[in-house]
Image (tube, rainbow, N blue to C red):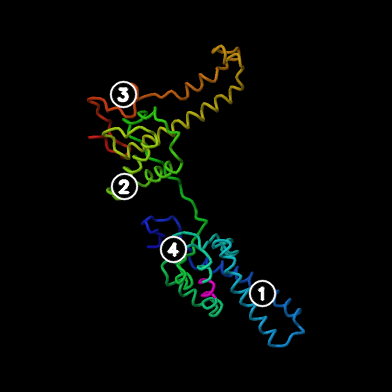
């Protein structure tokens, strides 16, 4: 299993980095660090030419530890796992649970890196990365970290399944202004992946999301309507409102500015420009489909003797 899983058994969409990209990132980092080490060493050698041999050796050891060991640790700590090489290759160091690393993680990785990368010229690190299922070297194992890919090619977006025809327009009177964006995102993610979930798990998630949505709108879920179908119908209603709002704005923009006299008289100007109130009314008046309650009440019962059409949306009609 190569996916990252949190303590709540939630699979994160992070892909572990493999050996080629990690080797390239390490090569870039080593080139930068070694260049800095050589330049600093030359500068210190010129500045300490008058010191004795013991002092020069102590300065050389301190320079090695500060530049080749302390430098990468400081960079990974301050950048939260993004060194120059990892940034160029689209990689990042994270904890096993997907969170950002801290100083202790960078310290363990940097200390082990001296042994498995500098001490063995990367042989131990390459072997450990090839053996590990998630491409981790020994420093990652001891630190509890993982190198992941940040730049992942995006696939085609999955569309939200449409609601059953017998629910289209039934929630036109719902007030959706209090529903936060986070809840909309959770509902969309569930609807696009509900067929991949276990029936029991998916049902419990749909029930919880529908209760949260009903609490935000102030209207209970209609009796006899499945939770998943209810979520799809409300999302469809929100999308329909957004489309009508955009079309109304585009229509007003195409018609040009509205004279004040047209708004006062409620009629049309010689140029044929309608008042904005008519556009808003024509863009927001819901149209209830045949077979729903006359007022389109969200909590109203299903009509007597109503038989839903053949299902093509993946939602089962109420019993």
**Which stretch is magenta?**
108-113
For disc 2, the marked residue is 202
Find disc 3 in the rendering and name its residue. 293
**Between discs 2 and 1, the one toward the N terminus:** 1
The alpha-carbon separation of the residues under discs 4 and 1 comes to 32 Å
User: What is the spatial separation of the Cα atoms under label 2 and label 1, in whole angstroms?
Assistant: 56 Å
State the CA–CA distance, disc 2 to disc 4: 26 Å
In terms of secondary structure, where does tag 4 sit?
Answer: loop
The spot of residue 165 in percent (x, y) is: 33, 31
Count residues near mark 1 (Cα–Cα under 10 Å), then give few for <14, some for 14-19, many for 20+: some
Classify the position of the N terminus by image quarter: bottom left
The percent position of residue 207, horizontal first and vertical second, equals: 31, 42
Upstream in the sequence, badge 4 or badge 3? Answer: 4
Q: Is 111 inside the magenta-drawn segment?
A: yes
Please say whether residue 78 is one of the residues in the magenta stretch. Answer: no
In-front residue for pair 284/306: 284
The disc at residue 96 is 4
Classify 10 Å Cα crowding around label 4: few (below 14), some (14-19), many (20 and above).
some
Q: Which residue is mark 1?
A: 37
Query: Reading the chain from its start, which is encountered first: label 3 or label 1?
Result: 1
């Amino acid at each position: 299993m190569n996916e990252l899983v949190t303590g709540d058994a939630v699979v994160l969409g992070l892909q572990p980095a493999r050996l080629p990209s990690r080797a390239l990132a390490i090569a870039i980092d080593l080139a930068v660090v070694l260049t800095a080490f050589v330049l600093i060493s030359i500068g210190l050698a010129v500045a300490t030419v008058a010191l004795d041999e013991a002092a020069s050796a102590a300065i050389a050891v301190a320079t090695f530890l500060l530049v080749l060991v302390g430098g990468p640790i400081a960079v990974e700590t301050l950048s939260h796992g993004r060194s120059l090489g990892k940034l160029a290759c689209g990689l990042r160091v994270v904890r096993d649970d997907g969170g950002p690393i801290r100083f202790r993680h960078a310290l363990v990785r940097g200390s082990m890196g001296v042994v498995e990368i500098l001490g063995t010229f990367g042989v131990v690190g390459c072997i450990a990365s090839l053996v590990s299922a998630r491409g981790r070297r020994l420093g990652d194992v001891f630190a509890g970290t993982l190198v992941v890919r940040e730049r992942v090619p995006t696939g085609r977006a999955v569309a939200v399944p449409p609601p059953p025809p017998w629910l289209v327009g039934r929630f036109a009177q719902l007030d959706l202004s209090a529903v936060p964006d986070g809840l909309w995102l959770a509902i969309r993610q569930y609807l696009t992946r509900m067929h991949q979930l276990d029936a029991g798990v998916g049902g419990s998630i749909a029930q919880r999301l529908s209760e949260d949505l009903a609490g935000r709108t102030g209207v209970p879920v209609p009796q006899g309507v499945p939770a998943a179908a209810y979520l799809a119908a409300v999302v469809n209603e929100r999308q329909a409102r957004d489309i009508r709002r955009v079309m109304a704005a585009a229509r007003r923009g195409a018609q040009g500015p509205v004279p004040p006299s047209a708004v006062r008289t409620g009629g049309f100007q010689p140029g044929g420009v309608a008042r904005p109130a008519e556009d808003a009314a024509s863009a927001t008046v819901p149209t209830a489909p045949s077979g729903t309650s006359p007022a389109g009440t969200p909590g109203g019962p299903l009509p007597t003797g109503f038989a839903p059409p053949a299902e093509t949306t993946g939602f089962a009609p109420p019993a």
